[in-house]
Amino acid sequence: MHEKKEGLTIVPIGGLEQIGANSMMIGCDNEWIILDLGIAFYDKYGIEILVPDISFPLEVRNNIKGILVTHAHEDHIGAIQHLWNKLRIPIYVTEFPAAVLRQKFSECSWGNNVEIHVVRNNDSFRIGEFEIEYVPLAHSIVGSSGVYIKTHYGNIFCSGDWKIDDTPMIGDSINIKRMEKIGKTGVDCLLCDSTNIMNCENDTSEGSEKDVKAAIKKIFKDNKDRRITITLFASNLARMEAIMSVALETGRKVAVIGRSMHKMLDAISKTSYYSSDLKRAVNGVISEEEAADMPPHKVAFLCTGSQGELRSALYKIAKKENRVTKLGKNDVVVFSSKVIPGNELGIRELQNMLVKSGVEIITTELTTAKIHVSGHPNKSAVSNMYKWLQPRSFMPIHGDPCMLRTHEKFAKACGIDETIVAESGDVISLIDGKLSKIGSKKVGLCCIESGNVIPLSSPIVKERAAMSTSGHVSVSFLLNSSSDTLNSSPDVVISGIYITNEIQEYLQTLIYQAITNDIASYSSNADLLIDAVKRSVKRLLLKCCDKKPLVSVHVHRC
């Protein structure tokens, strides 16, 4: 039995060191809920995604009452399909995220075992010690919600990702009266999105999807004789519908290129968000092959790849690896998206490839038109949330340390005195509106390798890192068991390090001498011999090539 503690406990297990891998645990009387379980994107050593380390959730698994999901973006929902089979706990979620999760689980052998409870916005439901309400908020994906958590110790409001948009095209806008009522009921702690908090005071990135539709319509009007391709986040279904509608209004057919876009359209078709207008727009979509045979002014493309992803549809087209679609001098490509920090080089590489092919590109940097609006709140919107909810204390979430510190400073400037900036793994106590750190739990990031969850700090990842920067040397030799001598020169293969033939021969001689010396000292113990040879080879490569490669040694006896 665990001793009960007065008050609530907040344990972030991801999302406070970088963009993505958002996840938070809330505890009350030894019962827990998990808020979101997302991935972070990674592009090193053959690793594409990272998930939170769930060592602590597994410690208390029998006391976790459920996973709650604020919305269906990968940085909030994407880790569930990789980690649920270890946790095996119920999921409580609203309609659209449920459709996306079912899609993901359909690819898993255990997918039919997942217990998914679909709940309605603004309906309270109880799981264990927690009374939960999903509160609809606008964002760049449909079905986004804040989560209002009530307990006998106090109440927490988690914003999830959100923005103010009075005309969101698809989905709900913020019900300010409901937010104000929640504030009057009581919010002991607000956990709030920090994504845009470092933008300047007069930030204009926030706006309505209705504004984007008007800007896209003008681009179609100004390029009536050219083929238009628009790349955007695949999850922004409201913008996809707006672009499809503009295309239909201007006499164009639309081809959707990119697996993730098709999956999102399939997911929304199974929900009440699938309006007659959206259905009509989707029914007008043609195949990529049909579009290739049409005159440029009669077609438009919707493409994945706005972040320069190597396997995205637009990247493959720009690289001329798409066998059907080719872009050239009669094409305009619109980047209807922001640049996510860390993706700058990949996006510029993609844009350069397009420009070299004669394509005109339109980006947020090259036009004042609102071809993109953010899905996150600026400072003005954040201050409005403070006013609506009147929280007794505040903890910034969803961002790196610079964002979190900036958000804390802004909250204090707006009159919230009780604040804390946490790190993933911190155990935060919330008692009577007061926040304090009372401990820490093991956290970190893991990668997915062949379906397995491996810590990013594992020897496998360290070996890949070493090989990517310093190369690899493989040494194989035949040892005479009776005389403990080399039968022949060792076989040395050097990969990823530039060396001349002369240095190669010189190294071969030095390595032969080093192995001979090591055999004399360690021939009776194979493990010690291998370690000694590794040290000798690393020392020689550092001296001759200024590299510290990963070294593999193979000893064969005869």
Image: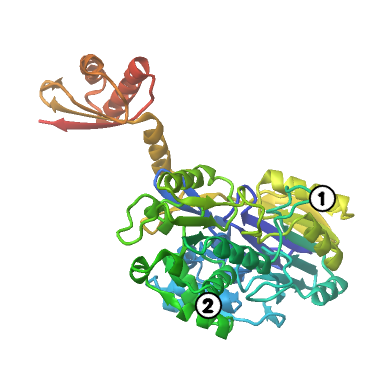
Q: Looking at the figure, which quarter contains the C terminus?
A: top left
Q: Residue at x 55, y 79 (%)?
A: 278
Q: Which amino acid type corresponds to the residue marked 2 in the rendered image?
A: Ile
Please count the marks in the image. Answer: 2
Task: Count residues near mark 1 (Cα–Cα under 10 Å), then give few for <14, some for 14-19, many for 20+.
Answer: some
Q: Is residue 140 visible?
A: no
Task: Count residues near mark 2 (Cα–Cα under 10 Å), then give few for <14, some for 14-19, many for 20+.
Answer: many
* Residue placed most toward the observer, 304 or 210: 210
Q: Position of residue 27 (x, y in %)?
A: 69, 65
Q: Residue at x 38, y 39 (%)?
A: 464
Name the side, left or right, on which 298 lies relative to 476.
right
2 or 1: tag closer to the N-terminus: 2
* Residue placed most toward the observer, 142 or 14: 142
- Seen in the picture, residue 292 relative to 498 is either above or below; the reply is below
Q: Furthest-front residue in view?
A: 225
* Residue placed most toward the observer, 124 or 533: 124
Q: Is residue 426 visible?
A: yes
Q: Position of residue 198 (x, y in %)?
A: 73, 47
Q: Which amino acid type corresponds to the residue marked 1 in the rendered image?
A: Phe
Name the element at disc 1: helix
Q: Which residue is mark 1?
A: 410
Name the element at disc 2: helix
Name the side, left or right, on which 321 lies relative to 364.
left
Q: Position of residue 480 (x, y in %)?
A: 11, 25
Q: Which residue is mark 2?
A: 268
Rendered image quadrant of residue 469: top left
Q: CA distance from mark 2 to mark 1?
A: 37 Å
